Image (cartoon, rainbow, N blue to C red):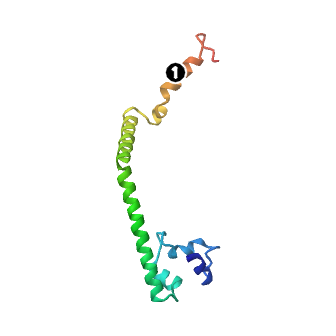
Amino acid sequence: MVCSALRKKAIPIDSSPALAQPYLLASKNFSPTDFLATVHSSSTYPVLASGLENLQESIQQESGALKQLVVGDFDRFVRCKNGIDEVYERMVEGGFDSKEDYGTLKIKKALDGMFTGSNGVEC
């Protein structure tokens, strides 16, 4: 609906999608003033009131869904975060840096030793 209204107002959103940003609710650049002035310039009060009610219901539903997601997955998130922190600490303490080829230097040396025969000739 928003995009069609912008096209009717001759705003070139197809060639310059950035021009649509102030009119899109999900955009960081959303401008309520521009949105109302451009998209709803000829809307009546009952239409605006109905739209406001729909918007409030939508926000309430999304808020409820987000709360469910946070509550439902909070324990899992905390466990994952703790696990990631533990792995990071081990990497830092264990010499996972560029000097040790990020923890692979010992393996590389062992493999190099395997491929070098007892007579010093490489395989």
- Residue at the location (58% across, 80% down)? 6
- Find residue 116 and report its image quarter: top right
Q: Nearer the viewer, residue 53 or 76?
A: 53
- Residue at the location (60% across, 13% down)? 117
The crowding category of the residue bearing disc 1, from other C-alpha atoms within 10 Å (few below 14, some 14 to 19, many at least 20), is few
Q: Is residue 85 left or right of residue 16?
A: left
Q: Quadrant of the N terminus?
A: bottom right
Pick out the residue farthest to the top.
119
In this rendering, the answer to whether 15 lies above or below 121 is below
Q: Position of residue 12 (x, y in %)?
A: 62, 78
Number of labels in the image equals 1
Q: Nearer the viewer, residue 42 or 54?
A: 54
Question: Is disc 1 placed on a helix, strand or loop?
Answer: helix
Give the amino acid at mark 1: Ala
- Find residue 66 and report its image quarter: bottom left
In this rendering, the answer to whether 63 lies above or below 6 is above
Q: Position of residue 30 (x, y in %)?
A: 47, 74
In this rendering, the answer to whether 4 lies above or below 112 is below
Give the labeled residue for mark 1.
Answer: 110
Q: Quadrant of the C terminus?
A: top right
- Residue at the location (63% across, 17% down)? 122
Q: Nearer the viewer, residue 5 or 20?
A: 5
Q: Position of residue 72 (x, y in %)?
A: 37, 51
In this rendering, the answer to whether 1 lies above or below 109 is below
Q: Position of residue 104 (x, y in %)?
A: 49, 30
Q: Nearer the viewer, residue 9 or 62?
A: 62
